[in-house]
Amino acid sequence: YNVALQFQGRGIDSTLNKHGESQAKKLGLALQDVPLEGLYCSFLVRAKSTAAAIGAHHNLEPVVVDGLEEMYFGTCEGIKLDDLYDLWKSTVNAWVEGDLHAAWPEGESPVQVEKRGREALLGLLTPQAKHVALVCHGRFNKLLLSSLLYGDMTKVETITQDNTCINVLDFHHETKTFTPRFLNYTEHWTPTVMAPSAIQKAAPPARKGETLRGKAKEKDVRISNIIAAKAIANAIRTSLGPRGMDKMIQQGNGEVIISNDGATILTQMQVYHPTAKMLVDLSKSQDIEAGDGTTSVCVIAGALLSACEDLLEKGIHPTHISEAFGIASIKAEQILTAMSRPVDLANRNELIQCVTTSLSSKVISEYSDRLSPIAVDAVLNVIDIATATNVDLRDVKVVKQLGGTIDDSQLINGLVFSKGFEKTSGVDMPAMIENAKIALIQFCLSAPKTDMENNVVINDYSAMDRILREERKYILNLCKQVKKAGVNVLLIQKSILRDATNDLSLHFLAKMGIHVITDIERNDIEYISTTLGCLPVAHIESLTPDKLGTAGLVQEESLGGHKVVKITEVVKPGKTMSILVRGSNKLVLEEAERSLHDALCVVRSLVKKRFLICGGGAPEIEVALQLAEYGRTLEGTAAYCLQAFADALEVIPYTLAENAGLHPIGIVTELRAKHAAGDKAAGINVRKGGISNMYDLNVLQPLLVNTSEISLAAECVRMILKIDDIVMVR
């Protein structure tokens, strides 16, 4: 409709009013420095006048082309909008709901307009013409743009077209697709704005009135969120891969942690920005789901956010980017699954190679030959290979003990405690017990105490003697009942309110030949009872022989000045395993424990999804190539967003090469060429500094790690994109 709110389509050939002429002149000035090689318009007078204002600066005569004219509104032409409001509303709603054949009475439908418009447009775009201007009409532009950019004319009402606005599109001759540079640009209306220079750039400095007509605050919040999240990704990017750097983290209490594990680094970082915290949570989610790839998932998310920044600058709506990224994530998972190969859990060597690949990027990578078999055997011993679909890692207990080296670490089919037996003076106890009867108790072998608020007042020594005699009698009675049950190894849970044992009870137990291990953590009770086949006892009256566990051997060993107790040859063992990790200092020991956790998670990932895939950046490059190819089959912004998603995935091989001191651009280009030639297993060999077959080098990893990385990163990025404001609540 026109300024008088009358329907004005192809059926009304009116001239420009004074305001329209002024706008046309400003449009001509805005385009005066653009090197136009063709100028086309519809046969309507208002279009020809506007085109003439542009052509005056280029010595170009506008060429009238059939098919570019405005939509024909039929019998509605010239009637005021108020008189046909219900018809207008119902017709537009029908288009939005998918009925694109709904036409105006005796007029045109969107399908008819799009067909003639597309044919006319494609007929004008030749490879020889680099810059072409078309002067068309509002409703015509909306329908054609929604078809060309989104492949979906139901989105016609999301597009705004003001009078004499400028839309700049790139046309790709090979795929016959269009990419928007910006839409509905109207800054040339303001005399102080130099529009020509802005138009020749990829995006104008100000974009008032384009497709995304949000507030300035909305844009600022979204960019702020992206910058904050990218800062987190960039902070740990240098830790990616077998040649990645380590981070030294100093905690507030003075403790120092050295690690290159993404989840560990991000957990220790003090992050205040709410969006940056989302990347910390993303790393934790990857750690829970797959256990490995915690650095990669953040690096991929950072690259996707950079891609989003570029797409938003081009005027593409965040919703369209989010939808396209969702499609790309699903397609990427399909591509990864297709290029993976099944794994047999009975093939121990193949599992060990996967774990070795995971450990290759850790601080303790040189000990992977020792830790990899331990991790694989530990998991395989706590599951039923034929039926297992998951692994409860609480069934594998990792115990740390200072002293020795990581090579001294061992897998124990039974229990191991990082402390020796409790000692008492005057009694020599053997360090080895055969056919041990083991009790796990949750009560204290010490004198009872009053409540915290109460006091016992003693006035004379005879009362003190009576109390001491009663205390001695009480503890002796407890120890006799323990002995009566047939116990010779006693495990006592740690107590908070009172001492679990005292010198007197330890003396009595030692005299009775009962070995004691104290300070058993409450969290370990279930694991110990499962391992030994015993039941925890909460009261002395419940301690009976049927509650005990039996083990063939309980042995106290001295390891470099520290003692440990091993319980093996359990008669009724549960499906649990223990790992004793050794290390020369606390830093190495803690990093070894974290690395071993990742190693166990790798085997768990293979149990959950029994497929292997090669590493070295090969999966990401293959997905990038196939996604880009798939994107070229789509139309509109979806194709452009898929290409951006594919390009972002190349950050993994790029970073691997960069961290290894290689030339990243050359390596990634060579890798891309190998994959384009059909070599799907080609990856970056950081040791030799070139491209190698990853399967030949046994650089393997679980499929779940890669699929989880891409799906979780895409999900996080889509969530960040949907945020348009931050609300602070007290």
Image (cartoon, rainbow, N blue to C red):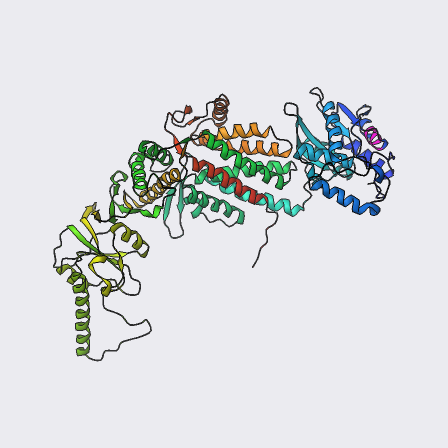
What residue do we see at 61% from left, 34% from top?
638
Residue 500 seen:
yes
Quadrant the N terminus occupies = top right
User: Magenta span: helix, strand or loop, mainly?
Assistant: helix
Front residue of this view, candidates 373 and 456: 373
Magenta residues, as a range? 46-52
Q: Is residue 394 above or below residue 151?
A: below
Residue 562 seen:
no
Q: Position of residue 634 (x, y in %)?
A: 61, 30
When asked about the image quadrant of residue 47, the answer is top right
Outermost residue on the bottom side: it is: 459
Front residue of this view, candidates 350 and 693: 350
- In the picture, measured across the screen, residue 527 lies left or right of residue 342, that is left
Tag count in the figure?
0
What residue do we see at 46% from left, 29% from top?
339
Q: Is residue 713 magenta?
A: no
Quadrant the C terminus occupies = bottom right
Q: Position of residue 212 (x, y in %)?
A: 67, 41
Q: Position of residue 90 (x, y in %)?
A: 75, 45
Q: Is residue 62 above or below residue 364?
A: above
Q: Position of residue 74 (x, y in %)?
A: 83, 37
- In the picture, measured across the screen, residue 393 lies left or right of residue 15, that is left
- In the picture, measured across the screen, residue 335 lies left or right of residue 365, that is right
Q: Is residue 50 magenta?
A: yes
Outermost residue on the top side: it is: 128
When asked about the image quadrant of residue 385, the answer is top left
When asked about the image quadrant of residue 687, the answer is top left
